[in-house]
Image (cartoon, rainbow, N blue to C red):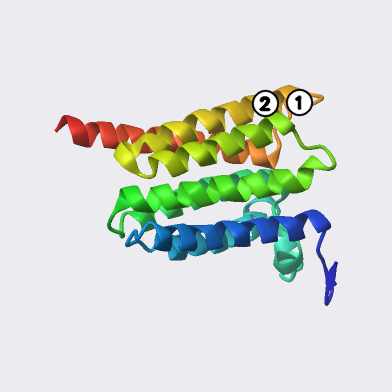
Amino acid sequence: MQIGKINLSEQLVWVGICVAIALLSIYLVGKFLKLSTNAADLAFETVVAFILFWKGSLLILSPLLVFNSPLSLLYFTGGHPGFILALLFTIIYFHWKLSNYQNHKNQIFLLSFGLVIGTFFYEIVQFAEEGSLGILLLLLAMLLLMVYWKSYNWRFLDVLLGGSILLFIIGMMRQEYMLETSKLQWLYLFVAIYIVWIQYGVYRRRMR
């Protein structure tokens, strides 16, 4: 697909559709459960921030390219290394933004639900080519458990942490070369690390 001078791959289009589904699900689930949050706004801001960070990573990884051709920021990203940097900066940005909101538990629950359902639909798209039925079933189980527990007592974090670790391991096992890590696996890894950080914060508050 081509928009002006910009070529968009089919995979990128599907990623955009899955992100839109995730954002819509956050809004609808929040309304259905009558949770007073700004999770949909926070999710949208986080997605935009990630795109800007991924684009901006080119300044760090290829400064001469940007200096010689500033418009390269419009057409290129930092690639795989830039994706990892963008994830790191996005999590820092998200944590900073989250601290400015109330009802952290509801916010994180809805955002977690949106992340899982967006990933679920992306895996459905990939299933026809190289997807895994095991991954689809795992994501479906995560969704059902999150719907069942909702935001009760932070249990959804256990589901998201365990699921992220399993998804990362399954992805490593399915690769031809074990040391290669896909963008989706990096996402699972960063999510798992951030959840551990949140759980540590919850534990500290309970011990006070």
- Please provide percent x and percent y for residue 184: 66, 41
Question: At 34% across and 58% down in the image, what residue appears?
Answer: 35
What residue sits 43% from the left and 40% below the top? 148
Residue 153, percent across and down?
A: 30, 37
Q: How far apart, in angstroms, are the residues tagged by discs 2 and 1?
A: 6 Å
Q: Residue furthest bottom?
A: 4
Q: Is residue 54 left or right of residue 143?
A: right
- Which residue is at 79% across, 24% downward? 177
134 is higher (above) or lower (below) than 121: above
Q: Is residue 12 left or right of residue 90?
A: right
Q: Secondary structure at mark 1?
A: helix
Q: Would residue 55 be seen by someone viewing this image from the given angle?
A: yes
Q: 117 or 98, which is in the foreground?
A: 117
Query: In terms of image quadrants, where is residue 197?
Result: top left
Asked if one can make out residue 191 in the rendered structure from this viewpoint, the answer is no
| Residue 116 versus residue 174 in the image, above or below | below
Residue 59 x/y as whole percent: 64, 58
How far from the left and from the top, in percent, is residue 58? Answer: 67, 56
Residue 202 quadrant:
top left
- Viewer-proximal residue, 174 or 56? 174
Q: Which residue is mark 1?
A: 174
| Amino acid found under the numbered disc labelled 1 | Arg
Q: Within 10 Å of the Cα at label 1, are there few (<14), some (14-19), or many (20+) other Cα atoms? A: few
Q: Quadrant of the N terminus?
A: bottom right
The residue depicted at 46 percent of the width and 33 percent of the height is 159
Q: Name the residue beneath numbered marker 2.
A: 170
Q: Which quadrant is home to the C terminus? A: top left
Give the total of numbered labels.
2
Label ID, residue 80: none
The reply to whether the C-beta atoms of the residues labelled 2 and 1 are less than 8 Å apart is: yes
> Label 2 neighbourhood size at 10 Å, few (<14), some (14-19), many (20+)?
some
